[in-house]
Amino acid sequence: MGDRFRVAYIGAGSFRFSTPFFMDMANMSAKHHLPLEVGLCDIDAKSLALMEKYFKRIVAKARSEEHTSELQSPNTI
């Protein structure tokens, strides 16, 4: 893989379809320790703004969970 994972997501304001996608992207980025760059696009500016905030929270949670699991791993010295 490269030094970064890039995604452009058209229709990102849809909560129903975006949520699983966002979770998968955030978990993949945290698991492989790759920076995640996502371009979000939607015709509904309000929905897009809400989903952007939601996505940032998902990414932060995925990173903190990955860090926590590494610290709590029995193989970690």
Image: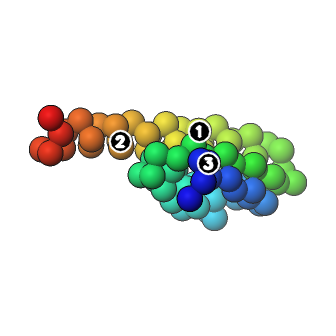
Which residue shows up at 61% across the image and 48% down it? 4
Classify mark 2: residues with Cα within 10 Å, few (<14), some (14-19) or many (20+): some
Above or below residue 20? Residue 40 is: above
Of the residues shown, which amino acid type is indicated by label 3?
Arg
> Nearer the N terminus, badge 2 or badge 3?
3
Disc 3: which residue:
4
Classify mark 3: residues with Cα within 10 Å, few (<14), some (14-19) or many (20+): few
Q: Residue furthest right?
A: 43
Residue 26: percent from left, percent from top:
52, 50
Marks 1, 3: nearer the viewer = 3
Of the residues shown, which amino acid type is indicated by label 1?
Lys
> Gap between marks 2 and 3, in whole Å?
20 Å
Residue 60: percent from left, percent from top:
49, 37
> Gap between marks 1 and 3, in whole Å?
17 Å
Of the residues shown, which amino acid type is indicated by label 2?
Glu
Disc 1: which residue:
56
> Nearer the N terminus, badge 1 or badge 3?
3
Which colour scheme appears in the figure? Answer: rainbow
> Gap between marks 1 and 2, in whole Å?
14 Å
Which residue shows up at 77% across the image and 60% down it? 11
Q: Seen in the image, is 61 located left or right of residue 65?
A: right
- Can see residue 41? yes
Residue 40: percent from left, percent from top:
75, 50
> Nearer the N terminus, badge 1 or badge 2?
1
Q: Residue furthest bottom?
A: 17
Instruction: Give the structural element (helix, strand or loop) at label 2.
Output: helix
Disc 2: which residue:
65
Query: Circles 1 and 2: CB distance less than 8 Å?
Result: no
Say which of 75 and 66 sits in front: 75
- Can see residue 15? no
The quarter in which the N terminus is drawn is bottom right
